[in-house]
Amino acid sequence: MSPVPPTIAHAMKAFVSNTPALVYQFELHADGRVAFPYVSDGCAALLGLSAAELQAEPQRFIDLIVPEDRKSYLDAMHASAASLSGWNWEGRVWIHEYKDQKWINLRSSPRPMPEQAGAVHWEGVMTNITASKLEQLEVTRSRARLAELAAHMEHVKEQERTRIAREIHDDLGGNLTAIKMALMMLTQRLPPDQPQLAERAAYVDSLVDRTIDAVHRISLDLRPSMLDFGINAALEWQIKEFEKQNGIACSFSCTEKEIDLHLDHATALFRIFQEALTNIAKHAHASRVAVRLQLLRQHIVLTIADNGAGIAQADRQKPQSFGLRGMSERAQALGGTMTLAHAPGGGTVVTIKIRLSSAKATIMASESPAAPAGNNDPDHVSEAEAP
């Protein structure tokens, strides 16, 4: 290879010297020794030690890495050396001189060293990413706090719904029942020669009956009493109501006779299920819906499949898709996930997978019948069949 002309070499050296990042060469020898054949002048600003100091004691670099991040650094280095693929790592270093912690990003390309079997040479750049990393961590923390707030608001909302439903049922329902009884007594005392009064009383009686039905329906919408009997009973009841109201054939199956789920989790899962059925009624144009509830060793999985028109990718990503977004966020608040997929033969499959607490999962798994042979994955979810 012909030597680099002096003017080009001088320009390259000037470019590297003025680069705010640290340009370096790094070597890993077959016996585990490391070396920095070249380190640019950016070393002092980034790592708090001069290029000469780092070259004289290359082991000092790993000593700068905070203990929690050293394993990931070594794993990334050895993986790059084994596959001769790019080395991209980010982690924290502690600068003793400044008593300061920095986030750095390391990017380099490897090549084998022909003069030494098993040795690898890298050329790359280290950059200070502290500002962007701290911003990213703050965004992550903010999202976590928002998720906690959303979960808390949902919990408070469900408590308020329960309170209102109880008051409606007890107060309004009790008053309406008393009105109906008083009306019955008055009707028995009406003069027989005034049929128009009897007709009017019958109308008022039917109006009271309709109001009692409305109170009952509103109470159930606010907080279904079937949740007190478990998630299985609540889902089965909601499916029957949905089938009756929309004329869509529905089926429900569950791997267990009863699944003992915490009331808050059962309520959140039930609300996701209600929203899924609402979406089917509004948009799917389906004629059949199949619902399956599965208890796995560490998870509970709810699958809702319809044979409708399906959900286009553009519809999933619309900013105003609050229904789908709310379902996903409810699932995430439970430490789970919600996925959408195309059903075989057309339609949509919604799958909600929620992780159970370790203690409850262990107890419930011990009570469950043994899984069928041929599937060694305790949390395997079979593909939903098209309804």
Image (cartoon, helix red, strand yellow):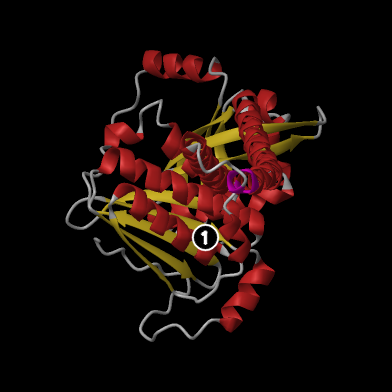
Q: Which residue is mark 1?
A: 234
In the image, is residue 144 above or below residue 360? above
Q: Is residue 240 left or right of residue 211?
A: left
User: Depth check: 147 or 67 in front?
Assistant: 147
Q: Please give the name of the residue rendered at 38% of the width and 86% of the height, measured from the top-left corner.
A: 373
Q: Position of residue 137 (x, y in %)?
A: 64, 33
Instruction: Tell me the SS state at disc 1.
Output: helix
The one nearer the camera, 316 or 230, is: 230
Residue 257 visible in the displayed image: yes
Which residue is pictured at 72% across the width and 44% down the height?
A: 66
x, y percentage for residue 362?
63, 75
- Looking at the image, which residue sits at the far left? 345
Residue segment shown in magenta: 184-188
Q: Quadrant of the N terminus?
A: top left
What type is the residue that disc 1 sits on? Answer: Ala
Q: Position of residue 24 (x, y in %)?
A: 53, 33
